[in-house]
Image (spheres, coloured by chain):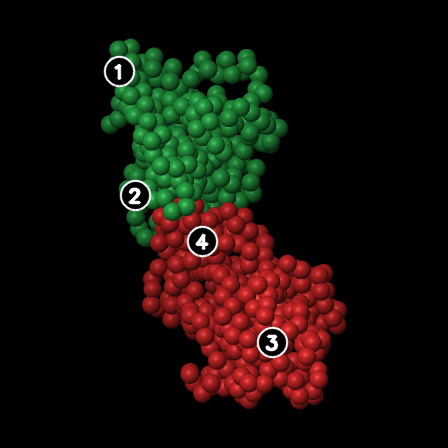
Chain colours: A green, B red
């Protein structure tokens, strides 16, 4: 049984990892783009705790670093990948959005990943592995039609697919009110898929609800649709943010780190944070020293 | 050389599927209306779901997703065969093909393979009209990291399909609609009828045909799939009516492009005509012409000629369709337009 301290440490590490990426961008040590997960950490940490990285699979999207770290704990491979270094988990070929390690995959086209995760569910069902195929969507992904084809297929074929919608209320710059009609939860229910919906940043609540969902999938072999209403504090990618500062301010009062941190002994919390900072500093140093990915350079 | 088979294309494909299912239990086939007793719109999967009810899945009409489902299965070690009822519907799956299927292996740094097969019929001459008659191979030809295979009626259709299923790469297996009903004509002692035939390249060979034992040809016509019978009729007419001898190369592997058989033939004949059923612009012929001119400029005595469908829609009414699609006369005209063909 994982403790709140462990959850906090994982969330804090993801937060600081992502903040560090933004810093490295400012320093010119990163190029291209990145989509940080700052503010949404409780979702990845609370949920992925229920998955077995040796058996279960995760298919994530462009905003995948939090999921990746929670599932693989491979900060060095990820940082190198984002920095274009040879020891990157995909040798620098994938970059921020296109990761693969063991049973973890991500890809950068919204919606595109949902049918693939459905196919993974079908393969694992056929093989009888008992694996759950988790796919992370966002409110933006719900605009892509293949999402609904996949819900239909997963329900029709009784596949162990865990559809997780992280509704962070913005598709890039567009507020959810301008991109989405009707109810998100009803979209899962319309296909006869079991649904749960949370509106919280409390990692323990998310952990419990996700545990119920994963248990249902393992028990029934059928899909589950979990809606996590959430918020990202960071811009869509790097500096593209025109949201109302008051709205951001209000959301920050519900920061998942504040919510969980308030329940920890302060000395314990600080010790955890320090451990994360040390690990992160070591990771950054090692990645900085690693050779750049280049034709003919092996990891 | 193999013995003469009296087998139609649909039968060769169907028998191969049955053999593959018997050999490997990781092979799964899915698509629209593939279950018995219907057995697929073109009957290629007949008997398969009765024999293997758990491994043949009929699907909703969701092509855009089905390509992704196949990708997911392949990523996890299965050997999916996806039947797309009409090749025209491949357009619905292009995101999955371009941004997933073709990319996973290289962008994930060779940690995965995507060994799937998409089987789909292409081609016209059946009056199905603008959205059920196209030859859209060219949409796939420019996508890196996939394999496009298109057997003709003179290829060992079944062994090509079996090789596609064994292939670690994603393979798009194009079945010209007329192939289903045509008798497969395999070389017998190096000949099909009056024509000498050489077969080269593995596992998706090219066939090179000559009426003069590869000596007196004045042009090479390169083609594939359902255009082969049209081209063979044209070169026969050129011999009988004008005493013009051509070699014909029928590729079965369209990408990755391998032109050894074409270059060898052009070295003998000195001129090239490309013939495809798809529309002209940005097509198979354009790519081959560019490559052959780069590789064998000094062998060519005339500009490459291209035969293809007009850049337009394929009309439904048969006389209009016939007017649009490349014909025997078009191939004859392209060959006779080459310098040095008419003395």
**Tag 2 subunit:** A
| N-terminal-most mark, 2 or 1 | 2
Q: Quadrant of residue A41?
A: top left
Residue B70 disc label:
4
* Quarter the N terminus of chain B occupies: bottom left
Mark 1 element type: helix
Crowdedness near tag 1: few (<14), some (14–19) or many (≥20) residues, C-alpha within 10 Å: few
Gap in Å between the C-alphas at discs 1 and 4? 47 Å
State the residue in front, A292 or B56: A292
**Left or right: B123 with respect to A200?**
right
**Tag 4 subunit:** B
Q: Where is A276 relative to A134, above or below?
A: above
* Label 1 sits on residue: A271
Place of residue A226 in the rendered image (x, y in percent of width and height, measured from the top left)? 43, 33
* Residue in the picture at 55% in, 30% down: A171
| Discs 2 and 3 share one subunit | no
Check whether the beta carbons of the residues at disc 2 and disc 1 lie within 8 A of each other.
Answer: no
Q: Nearer the viewer, mark 2 or mark 1?
A: 1
* Residue in the picture at 54% in, 33% down: A140
Q: Nearer the viewer, mark 1 or mark 3?
A: 3
* Label 3 sits on residue: B270
């Amino acid at each position: 049984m994982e403790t709140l301290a462990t959850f906090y440490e994982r969330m804090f590490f993801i937060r600081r990892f992502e903040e560090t990426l933004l810093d490295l961008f400012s320093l010119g040590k990163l190029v291209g783009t990145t989509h940080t997960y700052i503010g949404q950490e409780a979702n990845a940490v609370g949920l992925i705790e229920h998955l077995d990285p040796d058996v279960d699979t995760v298919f994530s999207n462009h905003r995948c670093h939090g999921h990746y770290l929670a599932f693989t704990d491979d900060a060095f491979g990820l940082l190198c990948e984002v920095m274009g270094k040879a020891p990157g988990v995909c040798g620098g070929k994938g970059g921020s959005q296109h990761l693969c390690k063991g049973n973890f995959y991500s890809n950068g086209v919204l919606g595109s990943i949902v049918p693939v995760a459905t196919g993974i569910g079908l393969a694992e069902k056929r093989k009888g592995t008992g694996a759950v195929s988790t796919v992370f969507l966002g409110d933006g992904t719900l605009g892509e039609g293949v999402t609904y084809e996949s819900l239909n297929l997963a329900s029709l074929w009784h596949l162990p697919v865990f559809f997780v919608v992280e509704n962070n209320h913005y598709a890039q710059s567009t507020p959810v009110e301008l991109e989405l009609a009707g109810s998100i939860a009803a979209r899962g229910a319309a296909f006869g898929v079991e649904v749960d919906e949370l509106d919280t940043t409390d990692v323990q609540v998310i952990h419990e609800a996700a545990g119920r969902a994963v248990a249902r999938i393992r028990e029934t072999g059928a899909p589950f649709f979990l809606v996590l209403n959430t918020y990202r504090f960071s811009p869509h990618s790097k500096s593209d943010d025109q949201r109302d500062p008051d709205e951001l301010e209000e959301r920050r009062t519900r920061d998942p780190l504040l919510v969980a941190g308030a329940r920890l002994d302060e000395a314990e919390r600080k010790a955890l944070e320090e451990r994360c900072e040390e690990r992160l500093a070591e990771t950054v140093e090692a990645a900085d020293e690693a050779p750049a990915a280049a034709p003919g350079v092996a990891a | 050389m193999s013995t003469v088979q009296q087998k139609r294309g649909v039968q060769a494909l169907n028998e191969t599927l049955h053999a593959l299912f018997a050999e490997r239990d990781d092979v799964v086939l899915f698509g629209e209306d593939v279950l018995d007793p219907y057995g697929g719109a073109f009957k290629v999967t007949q008997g398969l779901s009765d024999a293997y009810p758990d491994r043949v899945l009929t699907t909703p009409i969701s092509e855009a997703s089905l390509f992704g489902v196949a990708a997911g299965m392949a990523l996890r070690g299965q050997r999916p065969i996806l039947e797309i009822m009409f090749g025209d519907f491949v357009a619905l799956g292009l995101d999955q093909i371009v941004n997933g299927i073709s990319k996973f292996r290289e962008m994930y740094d060779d940690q995965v393979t995507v060994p799937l097969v998409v089987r789909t019929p292409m081609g016209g001459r059946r009056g199905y009209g603008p959205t059920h008659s196209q030859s859209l191979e060219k949409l796939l030809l420019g996508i890196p990291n996939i394999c496009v295979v298109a057997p003709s009626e003179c290829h060992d259709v079944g062994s090509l399909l079996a090789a596609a299923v064994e292939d670690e790469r994603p393979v798009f297996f194009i079945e010209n609609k007329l192939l289903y009903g045509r008798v497969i004509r395999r070389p017998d002692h190096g000949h099909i009828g009056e024509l000498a035939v050489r077969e080269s390249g593995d596992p998706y060979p090219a066939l090179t045909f000559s009426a003069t034992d590869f000596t007196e040809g004045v042009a090479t016509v390169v083609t594939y799939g359902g255009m082969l019978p049209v081209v063979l009729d044209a070169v026969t007419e050129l011999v009988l009516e004008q005493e013009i001898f051509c070699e014909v190369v029928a590729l079965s592997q369209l990408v990755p492009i391998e032109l050894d058989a074409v270059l060898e033939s052009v070295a003998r004949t000195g001129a090239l005509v490309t013939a495809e059923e798809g529309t002209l612009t940005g097509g198979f012929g354009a790519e081959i012409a560019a490559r052959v001119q780069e590789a064998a400029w000094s062998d060519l005595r005339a500009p490459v000629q291209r035969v293809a469908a007009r850049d337009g829609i394929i009309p439904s009414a048969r006389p209009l369709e016939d007017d649009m699609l490349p014909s025997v006369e078009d191939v004859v005209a392209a060959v006779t337009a080459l310098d040095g063909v008419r003395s």
